Amino acid sequence: MAVTVDEPVSTRTIGGIKVEIATSGQGKPLLFLHPEIGFDFVGPALDALAKTRRVTLPSHPGFGRSDVPRWMTTVDDLAYFYLDFLDELDLRDIAMVGVSMGAWLAAAIAIKSTERLSHLVLAGAVGIKAGDRETREIPDIFAMTEADYLATMFADPNAGKRDYTKMDEADLKVIARNREATARYAWSPYMHDPKLKRRLHRIRVPTLVLWGDRDKITTPEYGRAFAAEIPGARFETIEGAGHFPHVEQPAAFARKVLGFIGA
Amino acid sequence: MKVFHFTEQPYFPTWNDHNGSLRVNLPNRKCDPKVAADNYHRWYDEWALADELGLDIMVNEHHATATCTSSACIVTLSILARETKRARLLVLGYPIGHRPDPLKAAEELSTIDVISRGRLEMGFVKGVPYEVAVANTNPVFLMDRFWEAHDFILKAMTSHDEPFNWEGEYFHYRHVNVWPRPYQEPHPPVWITTSSATQARNLGERGYVIATLGSGYGTKDLYDAYRQGYVAKRGKMPGADRLAYLGLVAVARDEAEARRRAELVAGYVRTSGIVHLPFRNPPGFLSADDNARLLKAGKPPARTFTKDGRAVDMRTGSVQDLIDAAIMFAGTPDQVYQQLVDFCDWVGGMGNLLMMAQAGFLTHADTVDSLNLFAKEVLPRLKEYKQPRGTAAAA
């Protein structure tokens, strides 16, 4: 699903991988790392952020209309891709904002290098194992019916409801690619990297951990455990939001993000 | 024609007590091990009979399911390797893409081939979508993993002079040296299942046995693709022994009794798809294009067709529908023979009938009677039957 932005979605080849990039607004750079649903429902949050920032929104390799090479199989691979991406675009002083899998990815980038970053915002992050081996902290989205998925993912299930039979096949293919790419990177270990928790201490830029207060995929307790591993990280909740606060409360989401990173 | 007796070894006592899913999430509390033990011994009795009657034997493997209690096909093959005397032992199949350790698979299969004195037919399968949830194999890479496991197993079975090294995408070994090496040279025959024309052609190029199920009269298209691949590589048509088809079979002296048995055997196709919805289509199991079409249509495409192109839903079709679509062959020995020969003529030859002669609630007594009747009155005529020469479009 294409986003409505003030510039057309462009493509760029980085390290031999062609990715699509949406760009919007003017100001200091903000890199938005999308969640497992790609660009779906991102419009209102993007517009709000783009009022004072220049927002770069790429589709991760394998998602949306971005290519993916066979060897790219882990969030770690994606993180190294994005280090090249930031070098190539020569972005500096970036506020990096990720949601869910995008927040996992943002953390995986930041533990490797914060050289180009000013701030980090992690919203509804997955990516760490906080509890014991017999507790599945992150519900298995691949074992859910569509109705269960919507009820778990959103505070208001209608926020994610669509009639697929009335959509274009090209847009449906993006939905299918997003689902497949999510499995590609997060099938097993499911939605986390066992090593990430031990490496989060390396993040030395101001970090905001944002959580929907009605998040049933990763609970606010999981969010606090995530924040506790990052030196000085601030933890805040957004009222009336489930796992994708940028979708359900885009204004509050943008206000919190911009309030933290500064316009 | 070779005929393989096959049962999924169903745990049928739960078929009316499953809360919407017979696979993956049906708690094993519903499996009474004493009942299961009786069932297993019964299957072995029926396989022993098949061996005596001149039939061959097929076993398969599924996991966490009451539709099929063969969760360790190697165990079954191990017992059959020793207990049977002459039957070919077909595993169709061994889900090698889901196995963590293909070296173990090569060792197991070689050992079974040796104990059976070269009677193993080695079928490899991708596995149905529901297997992914249990094995936890990433469905996005399942076929890559399958082919690497395949390449490794064949190399392990055919390397005899020194241990070899393997550092692949999925599997790593330093000193591969399989003892015992297989009985058959260069290795047990390879069978692979598919429902895709692209894969069928690939199997033709490799010369493996292609097996399909549920494809009905649409099977001809798959066999044509196979024949094209075969001819392209070898410059001649494959024999019918390269082509296999799984059919449900119900036979009895009179038609009414055959139809009664057919209703029971049809229990397989009517229960096989009862699975919690999300497990039916894991991400990446189908291509993104196929998934986009699926979302658009809101339901899966038909894949089973009659001769005149009528789609038959295997789960809801009547026994007559199933016969019309060649999912089932049922009737008196004459009728079953005619239906089978008719199917072979239609698809351009088919030399291996994978005969599901037991399914669901069909009793031991009925199964024994069906097997005896089939072996005495259908099998000899099928052995005499002259297969048509299949047609292949120019490669």
Image (spheres, coloured by chain):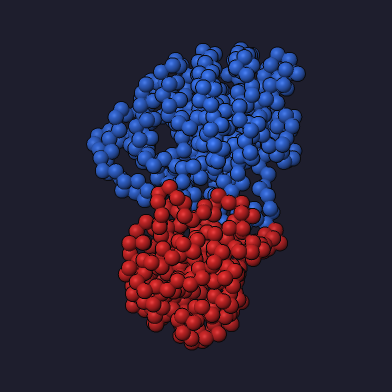
Chain colours: A red, B blue
User: Going 44% across and 16% down the picture, which residue do you hit?
Assistant: B83
Image coordinates of residue B47 in percent, x first then y, are 52, 18
Q: Quadrant of the N terminus of chain B?
A: top right
Q: Is residue B110 or residue B66 the one in the foreground?
A: B66
Residue that appears at 62% across and 19% down:
B363
Residue A7 percent coordinates (x, y): 57, 81
Q: Mark yes or no: residue B142 visible.
A: yes
Above or below: residue B63 compared with residue B372: below
Which quarter of the picture shows residue B240? top right
Relative vertical location of residue B53 with respect to residue B283 in this rendering, above or below: above
Residue A65 appears in the figure: no
| Above or below: residue B157 compared with residue A208 | above
- State which quarter of the image contains the C terminus of chain B: top right
Q: Residue at x 54, y 59 (%)?
A: A216
The front one of B171 and B323 is B171
B372 or A74, which lies in front?
Answer: A74
**In the orientation shown, which residue stands out farthest toward the left?**
B162
Q: How many labels were placed on the picture? A: 0
x, y percent for residue A191: 45, 57
Q: Residue at 48%, 86% (x, y): give it.
A: A263
User: Which quadrant of the figure has residue A235?
Assistant: bottom left
Instruction: Tell me where residue B19 appears, x and y as whole percent.
Output: 63, 38
